[in-house]
Amino acid sequence: MTPNDRQKLRERIVADLARIAQDIEALKELTKPVPPGADGMDEVSRMDAIQNKSVNEAALAQLRNRQVGLEYALKRIDEDDPDFGFCVECGEPIPLARLMAMPEASRCVNCAD
């Protein structure tokens, strides 16, 4: 991976982290507890709100996991880790296109399957 590729990947990660931080803040609002009788809700509306809260909690967990992976990838790039961009399973280089799509990827496509 060239220094230019690393810089592009770093910029991508920073942009993704900024977007994820915004998404996390928005989802935090949507995962607040739904109290009984909130805003004049009937029981069906409350159950819908609880279901939506569960879906949003799952999305929030996924975003937080991705955030951790991206932060780790950024740390490895910033520390100029010589193993960054190589598959942890087979040791082959991870294609740049895969890293641009999933900067937190630690396995090549073949080993990820």
Image (spheres, grey):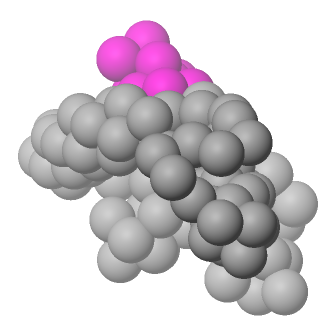
What secondary structure prevails in the magenta region? helix
Q: Is residue 103 visible?
A: yes
- Residue drawn at 47 percent across, 64 percent down: 102
What residue is shown at x 35% (from left), y 17% (from top)?
78
Q: Is residue 16 left or right of residue 38?
A: left
From which residue to which does the magenta span run?
71-81
Instruction: Spot the residue most to the top.
Output: 79
Q: How far from the left and from the top, in percent, is residue 77? A: 39, 28
Residue 60, position as x, y percentages in the image: 60, 46
Q: Residue at x 50, y 33 (%)?
A: 28
Q: Is residue 55 magenta?
A: no
Residue 61 location (% of width, % of height)? 69, 45
Q: Nearer the viewer, residue 72 or 44?
A: 44
Nearer-the-camera pick, 108 or 38: 38
Is residue 75 left or right of 62 when viewed as pictured?
left
- The correct choice, above or below, for 36 with respect to 98 in the image is above
In x, y percent, where is residue 84? 55, 40
How many marks the image carries: the answer is 0
Residue 62 in sight from this viewpoint: no
Q: Residue at x 65, y 45 (%)?
A: 37
Asked whether 19 or 51 is in front, the reply is 51
Q: Quadrant of the C terminus?
A: bottom right
Tell me: residue 80, above or below residue 3: above
Q: Is residue 73 magenta?
A: yes
